[in-house]
Image: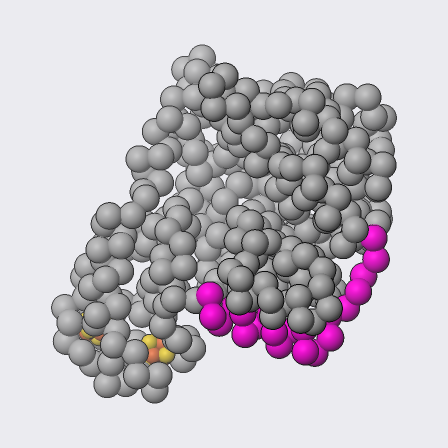
Amino acid sequence: MIYNDFNGLKLSRLGFGCMRFALDPETNTIDQEKVNAMFRLAREKGVNYFDTAYPYLDGKSEGAMAEALKNYPRESYYIADKFPGHSLPGPVDNRALFNISLQRCGTDYFDFYLLHNITEWSVKIYEDPAYHIIPDVIALRDEGKIRHLGFSFHGGPELLEAFLTRYEGVFEFVQIQCNYLDWTLQDARTKYDIITRHGLGVWVMEPCRGGKLAVLDEVSHQKLQALGGGSDASYAFRFLQDLPNVKMILSGMNELFQVEDNLATFESHLPLSEEERETLFSIAESLKKGVPCTGCRYCCDGCPQELNIPYLIECYNDYKYQSSFTASMRIDGLDEGRKPADCVACGQCAHACPQGIDVPSVMEELAELYEKGPKWSSAAKSRHESIKRDLNM
Ligand code: SF4
Ligand code: SF4
C-alpha cells in the first residue's frame, strides 16, 4: 500500500468509500457479510481510511461501516464522516445530529469530519447564522471530538476560492470530484490548484466517475489495453496517484473483485507515461457531449441579462455528460434573473465567442434540462423527514 504523510498522520492513499454498499432490494438491508469480507481484505492490505456520511444509504452506511470495523483497534484506522447541512429541514440541534453519527459509528470522536456537499446553493445554509453550523463544528473540533476538519465540494472554482479565503486556517482538506474526465469537464484542475495554493490537502471522490471510467466503451477500453493492459479503473487511479497533493483517493467499492483490483493498483505508484496520459485525455474528450467553452469570458460584457455564461455552460456540459443534482444545485444557487431561462436570445454572446458556440441555443436547452432534470428540492424532502425523525422533531 502507498501511504501519504498528512499533518503527522500516515494515511493509506486508497480510502474505502462507504456510499455504495449494495442494498438488498427486498429487505432494503446491507449485506453485512459482504462488507465484512471487503473490509477484511482492505485492512489486510493496509487500507486505514473509511469514509461515510450521515445520509448515505438512508442512514445505514455508518452502522455497516462500524460493524465491519468493530474488531480492529480504534487507533489503527481513521473514520471520516460528514455533517448534512445540505439536507436539513431548517435550523436543527447540530450537536444532536453529530452525536447520532458518533453513536452509529460506535466512536466518541471522528478523525476527519466534513461539511457535506458545499455548492453555490448549499453554502447559503452553511453560512446562515440561524443554522450556526460552522461555529458548532469548530467548537466540536476544539473539544477534540473532531480531529481534522474539511468539506466536500461540488461548486465552481470562484466559490471555492472565496470560501477558502473566508475561512483561512479553519479547514485542513477539501474533497472534490476529480478524475481524468472532470479534470477539464468540471475544471477539477483549477480546483486542485486553488486548494494546493491555500496549503490544504486534496481528497478525491468519484475517481472513476461513479464507475463509468472503470468500465469504458469498447473502443476506449481497447486503446488502454493497447498500452499494455491493466484494468480501466487502474488507469483512472494512476492518473490521480501522479498528482502530488492528492492525499486521499476514495473508492466506493461494493464488490470483492473491485477491492482486489484497487489494492493491486495501490501496491505501488506506477507513474503514467506521456503516451498513457495523452490517451486518457483523448478518451476524456471523446466522452464529453457538451460545447468547448474555454471560460475566456469574452461573451460576458455585452450580456444585457448579466448572465454568468461560462458558469452556466459548465452546468450545461455537466448535464450533457450525465444528469445529476450537481448542475441543478449550482443553478439553484444563482440569484433570480440570472438563470438560463432569463436569456433573451439577443445573440451578443455568440458574436463575441471565439469558439463559435451558439450560446443562445445552449441557454435554451439548459433551461429545459434544468426544468425537467432532477431537483434537489424534491429529493431532499425524504431526507428532511428522516432527520426530523432522528431528532424527534
Ligand atoms: S443571448 Fe442570452 S446569454 Fe447571450 S448575451 Fe443575449 S441574453 Fe446574454
Ligand atoms: S466567449 Fe465562448 S468560450 Fe469564451 S466564455 Fe463565452 S462561451 Fe465560453
Give the percent coordinates (x, y) of residue 201: 69, 56
Does residue 330 appear anywhere in the picture? no
- The picture quadrant where one finds residue 387 is top left
Give the percent coordinates (x, y) of residue 189: 57, 68
| Along the line of sight, the residue nearer the viewer: 95 or 357 | 357
- Residue at x-position 37% and y-position 68%: 290
Q: Which residues are magenta?
A: 267-287
| Along the line of sight, the residue nearer the viewer: 266 or 384 | 266
**Does 252 sit above or below residue 191?**
above
Residue 280 in the magenta stretch? The answer is: yes
Q: Main secondary structure of the magenta part?
A: helix
- Residue at x-position 23% and y-position 62%: 365
- The picture quadrant where one finds residue 307 is bottom left
- The picture quadrant where one finds residue 252 is top right
**Does 285 sit above or below residue 114?**
below
Give the percent coordinates (x, y) of residue 109: 72, 28
- Residue at x-position 54% and y-position 58%: 216
| Along the line of sight, the residue nearer the viewer: 238 or 106 | 238
Looking at the rendering, the quadrant in which ligand 2 lies is: bottom left
The type of colouring in the image is: one colour
| Along the line of sight, the residue nearer the viewer: 203 or 264 | 264
Give the percent coordinates (x, y) of residue 376: 35, 40
Does residue 254 appear anywhere in the picture? yes
